[in-house]
Image (cartoon, rainbow, N blue to C red):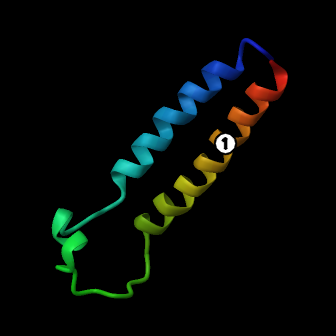
Amino acid sequence: MKTILPYIQIILSVLLITAVLLQQRGTGLSAAFGGEGNVYRTKRGFEKVIFGGTIVLSILFFAAAVATVLIR
């Protein structure tokens, strides 16, 4: 288990980075300065699946990191 955890963390980190990059940001940097007109918007379809997957992947990555620290 001690040798598998780093590989699991690498796989989870690549998947997490991909999930974050797939999330849609329509306006880019202008939203940081108040350029976004939509104050509240619901997620639908594929965007909702990616959002939920990102949360699950981040929890799994955190659990793998804690397990790595506890095993050493």
- Nearer-the-camera pick, 26 or 39: 39
Q: Quadrant of residue 65?
A: top right
Residue under the point 74% across and 26% down: 68
Residue 13 image offset from top left, x and y in percent: 52, 34
Residue under the point 55% across and 28% down: 11
Residue 2 image offset from top left, x and y in percent: 78, 15
Rendered view: 22 above or below 8: below
Q: Residue furthest top?
A: 3
- Nearer-the-camera pick, 12 or 49: 12
Q: Quadrant of residue 29?
A: bottom left
For badge 1, the amino acid type reads Phe
Residue under the point 83% across and 22% down: 71
* Screen quadrant of the C terminus: top right
Residue identifier under label 1: 62
Near mark 1 (Cα within 10 A), the count class, few <14, some 14-19 or many ≥20, is some
Rendered view: 60 above or below 40: above
Q: Find numbered disc 1 in the image and state the secondary structure of the residue it sits on.
A: helix
- Nearer-the-camera pick, 40 or 43: 40
Rendered view: 56 above or below 42: above
Residue under the point 66% across and 49% down: 59
Number of marks present in the image shown: 1
Q: Residue furthest right?
A: 71
Direction from residue 58 to residue 27 in the image, left or right = left
* Screen quadrant of the N terminus: top right
Residue 18 image offset from top left, x and y in percent: 40, 42
Residue 49 image offset from top left, x and y in percent: 50, 62
